[in-house]
Amino acid sequence: MKKETDFIPSPDNLHSDTATKLWRKLVKTELGINVNIYSEKHRGANKKILAGIDLDALKELYGHTSKLTTLTYAKVVKEVNRKQIMEKLPDS
């Protein structure tokens, strides 16, 4: 790869939009693929939740400090929780 496209560990902090700008340049512009950088993160989070991975574990995996941030990626959590509640309700 070209040096300007490599992510090399550095003592300097990157700006929060560095990855987004690089994605836009390399994938959207140069490759002509119109896919959002976070679409795979959303899909991956949903698959992990559906596979039974706990939201706290997913939060840690993604490096989030808040469950609310993780919930923006794991859209199926509400449906999974609803299904679990319905399955575990005692018969009245």
Image (cartoon, rainbow, N blue to C red):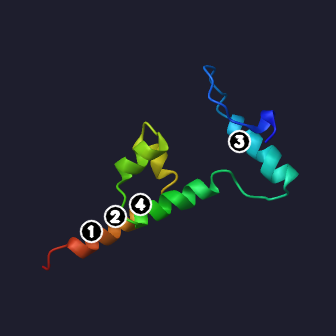
Label of residue 20 in the image: 3
Report whether residue 75 is seen. Answer: no
Looking at marks 3 and 2 on the same chain, the residue that comes earlier in the sequence is marked by: 3
Residue at screen point 81% across, 47% down: 26
Q: Are marks 3 and 1 in contact (CB under 8 Å)?
A: no
Q: Are marks 2 and 1 in contact (CB under 8 Å)?
A: yes
**CA distance for labels 1 and 4:** 12 Å
- Residue matched to label 1: 85
- Residue matched to label 4: 77
- Specify the quadrant that holds the C terminus: bottom left
Seen from this angle, which residue lies furthest top? 11
Q: Quadrant of residue 77?
A: bottom left
Looking at marks 1 and 4 on the same chain, the residue that comes earlier in the sequence is marked by: 4
Q: Are marks 3 and 4 in contact (CB under 8 Å)?
A: no
Residue at screen point 57% across, 54% down: 41
Give the image location of residue 87, x and y in percent.
Answer: 25, 75
- Specify the quadrant that holds the N terminus: top right
- Residue matched to label 2: 81
Mark 3 secondary-structure assignment: helix
Residue at screen point 46% across, 39% down: 64
User: Is disc 4 surrounded by few (<14), some (14 to 19) or many (20+) residues within 10 Å?
Assistant: some
Tell me the kind of residue under disc 3.
Thr
On the rendered structure, is 63 left or right of 86? right
